[in-house]
Amino acid sequence: MIHIAPSILSADFSRLAAHAKQALEGGATMLHVDVMDGHFVPNITIGPPVVAALRKSVDCTLDCHLMIEHPDRYVAAFADAGADWISVHQEACVHLHRTLEMIKSRGLKAGVVINPATPVGTLVEVLDMVDFVLIMSVDPGFGGQKFIPSSLEKIRKLAAIRQAVRNQFQIEIDGGVTQGNIAEIARAGAEIIVAGQAIFGDGDARLNTERLHKVANEAVMAKV
Ligand code: DX5
Ligand code: ZN
């Protein structure tokens, strides 16, 4: 069963809760919250106050993707705001193990993220402690970019490592997902699929989510 995680980065911020709810009505079980600081990535987005506002208005998992330097300094603020999942970039964490422990100590699901140029193998030492691994399929910073095809091989590689070492983490993919490529992404082994433009761009967010979910689930069913 695939989970669709709508990225609110592409939602209409002037009616954020209502727009996000449309995607949830389409079968999404979580919202993906892209936090950018203008340092780790060349864009600035949102922080804990928006997470707190969403927490009050939607009843779903809030998956907070921190694209920021020194994420350890902000884990408590996002936890207090109501984040359920927090992921941090391998590239931004000098003490990755410590930062992941910090997230887990708050009772949240902890994830690690890798950029397109970062090999899956750099995560081997933390795979037994994370709840999910997020593979970036675009260079982080903006919604609506083109999917980097080599990400598919990274998903397959990570799924193979997981099978070999019998870890339990889930595999999430983020960036450039469309109606046209989601089947291939699901077949490669991604279980949580983030989509921004494909949901909140053109058309109706509920219908877009329903369609993505259907195509992804059918692709996985056809595989088994
Ligand atoms: C990129 C963000 C993504 C992005 C996904 O830095 O992490 O979550 O918003 O948006 P789309 O699906 O439009 O690529
Ligand atoms: Zn993201």
Image (cartoon, helix red, strand yellow):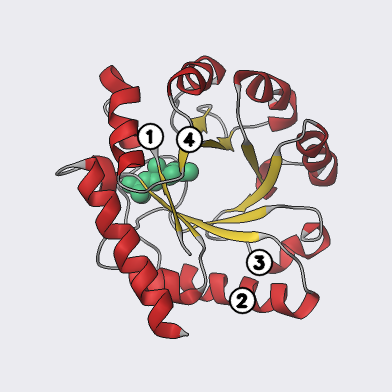
Residue that carries the numbered disc 3 in the rendered image: 120
Q: Amino acid at mark 1?
A: Ile
Establish whether ligand 2 lies closer than 8 Å to the Cβ of label 3.
Answer: no
SS assignment at label 2: helix
Q: CA distance from mark 4 to mark 3?
A: 22 Å
Give me the residue at 28% from left, 54% from top.
210
Residue that carries the numbered disc 2 in the rendered image: 157
User: Residue 8 has which mark?
Assistant: 1
Neighbour tally class for label 1: few under 14, some 14-19, many 20 plus, Cα within 10 Å: many
Q: Quadrant of ligand 1?
A: top left
Q: CA distance from mark 3 to mark 1?
A: 26 Å
Drawn side of residue 90 relative to residue 210, left or right: right
Establish whether ligand 2 lies closer than 8 Å to the Cβ of label 4.
Answer: yes
Q: Amino acid at mark 3?
A: Val
Drawn side of residue 60 relative to residue 84, left or right: left
Give whichever of discs 2 and 1 has the lower sequence position: 1
Looking at this rendering, what residue extends furthest in the left direction?
203
Q: Are marks 4 and 3 in contact (CB under 8 Å)?
A: no
SS assignment at label 3: helix
Q: Nearer the viewer, mark 4 or mark 1?
A: 1
Q: Are marks 2 and 1 in contact (CB under 8 Å)?
A: no
Drawn side of residue 68 relative to residue 100, left or right: left
In the rendered image, residue 141, in percent from the top left (x then y), is placed at 44, 40
Give whichever of discs 4 and 2 has the lower sequence position: 4
Q: Nearer the viewer, mark 2 or mark 1?
A: 1
In the rendered image, residue 124, in percent from the top left (x then y), is placed at 78, 65
Residue that carries the numbered disc 4 in the rendered image: 34
Q: CA distance from mark 4 to mark 2?
A: 25 Å
